[in-house]
Amino acid sequence: MTRIILIDSICTPQRALQASRRGIAGYLYLGDRLTERLKGAVTDVLEGGTYYSPTAAAALAEAEHLTDRVLPRLNAYHRAVLRGMAQYQPAAQIAAELGRTTQAIYQVQSYLRGLFDVDTNGALLERAAEIARAHGEHGVFQGWARLTTRVRRRVFEQRPASRQAAIAPLLSLALYWICDGGATAPVHSFPGV
């Protein structure tokens, strides 16, 4: 069996989880001090073990934590609230569509912020996007996962000075996509994309 060690300049929970799922035995992040670790990593992998450098191991632990703690607790009601939030709907509008009170929506948003371990609704949507990229097969996040991968590629293929200008329309597109389920909204239909 071929043993693989991945040496990467990017280390996110998504990438670490994907590497683990694909059977990558070693994951070394270039931001870690690899001089001392490389020999041990190669030895561990050749002996049939696994080795993830400290940053990669922390990213994998975070991804596994989200998988074990967050996804099982999301129900259809939570996903509907997230969809409404992604469409920039006020809590009153989400409540009206779901037949609930505005206070109930605020409570669900508070619960979701606690569940995702974030302080703001914006951070909540970003964390949901991170989970979507790592777990594209889960319900409401399917379209979001496909799109955010394309969005990330487009933003990072540009020169650094133009990245900030590119992010706003792409984020709007991504938020539209999650609400729509990926059925419409071709990339070329948004200004600046």
Image (cartoon, rainbow, N blue to C red):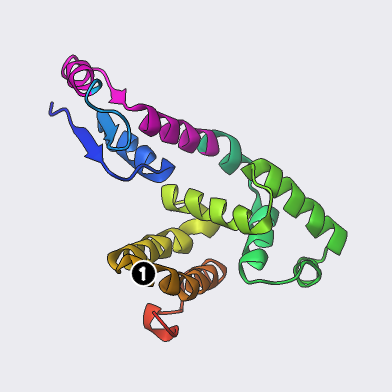
* Residue in front for this viewpoint, 126 or 22: 126
Q: Residue at x 57, y 69 (%)?
A: 179
Quarter of the figure that contains the N terminus:
top left
Residue on which disc 1 sits: 161
Q: Amino acid at mark 1?
A: Ala
Q: Is residue 138 above or below residue 181?
A: above
| 65 drawn magenta | yes
Residue farthest along the front direction in this orientation? 161
Looking at the rendered structure, the secondary structure element under dot 1 is: helix
Q: Is residue 106 above or below residue 85?
A: above
Within 10 Å of disc 1 (Cα), the crowding (few <14, some 14-19, many 20+) is few
Q: Quadrant of residue 20?
A: top left
Seen in the image, is 120 located left or right of residue 172?
right
Q: Nearer the viewer, residue 81 or 128?
A: 128
Q: Main secondary structure of the magenta part?
A: helix
Q: Position of residue 149 (x, y in %)?
A: 37, 60
Quadrant containing the C terminus in the rendered view: bottom left
Would residue 48 be found to the left or right of residue 108 on screen?
left
Task: Give left or right: position of 134 versus 123.
Answer: left
Q: Nearer the viewer, residue 7 or 87?
A: 7
Q: Position of residue 69 (x, y in %)?
A: 59, 35
Q: Position of residue 7 (x, y in %)?
A: 22, 37
Q: Residue at x 50, y 48 (%)?
A: 131
Left/right placement of residue 147 relative to residue 121 reads left
Highlighted range, magenta: 38-66
